[in-house]
Image: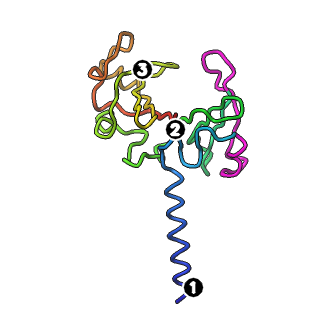
Amino acid sequence: MKSTLACLFLVTIMVYFKSEEKILGDHKAGYVQIGMQADELYGYYEHNSLELFDQFLEATFSPAFNIKNEHGMVELVAELNCNTIWRIKVVSPDYKTKEGVHIGSTLGELKEYFSFEEVLRGEGNIVVYSKEKDLSFLLDVYQMEELGVDLNGRIELADIPNEVRVAAILVL
């Protein structure tokens, strides 16, 4: 009986921690947190799941870590300023906010949970930013173009159809 209860307790804890590792919010994505040192990543991830590379953003040296899952697919990009993580790009739909928002969610779904003051542009992306959560949602520009949104002019939130999907999320 005691061993059954101990087993059940361990399984419950494992499920809890497994679900916690894919949560977005509070300046973090899973185990990766804004402000943490790059070498701390090795305490959470296998060495072969971390790949240091240069993103070369805006024609400057921009070091980052690709963080891969057990199948070798990139899930997160931890962007560095010197040795400190300053931004996390989420590219896997497995990571979700507590509200359930993830890659593939629609702008309409985002509007149910977050308020957005403006539409931003940067690094070739169209972004809506949630100030209260410090999350930026990169929208699918290809889908926007297919839906007739003029990507060359000024874009207001009302110009973007609610069915446009989230292509990536930036944790700030």
Give residue 26's mark: none
Query: Do the residues under discs 3 and 1 have CB atoms within 8 angstroms?
Result: no
- Residue 132 location, quadrant: top left
Q: Is residue 44 magenta?
A: yes
Give residue 3's mark: 1
Q: Which SS class for mark 1?
A: helix
Classed neighbour count for the residue bearing mark 3: other residues with Cα under 10 Å, few (<14), some (14–19), many (≥20): some
Magenta part of the chain: 38-62
* Residue 49 position within the rendered picture, expressed as x and y whole percent measured from the top left: 67, 46
Q: Which circle, 3 or 2, is nearer the viewer?
A: 3
Q: CA distance from mark 3 to mark 2?
A: 18 Å
Q: CA distance from mark 1 to mark 2?
A: 40 Å
Q: Name the residue type under label 3.
A: Leu
Residue 116 vs 104, above or below: the answer is above
Whichever of labels 3 and 2 marks the residue nearer the N terminus, that label is 2
Which residue sits at x=64%, y=41%?
36
Q: Name the residue type under label 2.
A: Val
Give residue 90's mark: 2
- Residue 115 location, quadrant: top left
> What residue is shown with label 3?
120
Residue 34 vs 31, above or below: the answer is above
Query: Do the residues under discs 1 and 2 have CB atoms within 8 angstroms?
Result: no
Q: Which SS class for mark 2?
A: strand
Whichever of labels 1 and 2 marks the residue nearer the N terminus, that label is 1
* Residue 164 position within the rendered picture, expressed as x and y whole percent measured from the top left: 33, 30
* Residue 39 position within the rendered picture, expressed as x and y whole percent measured from the top left: 73, 43
Colour pattern: rainbow
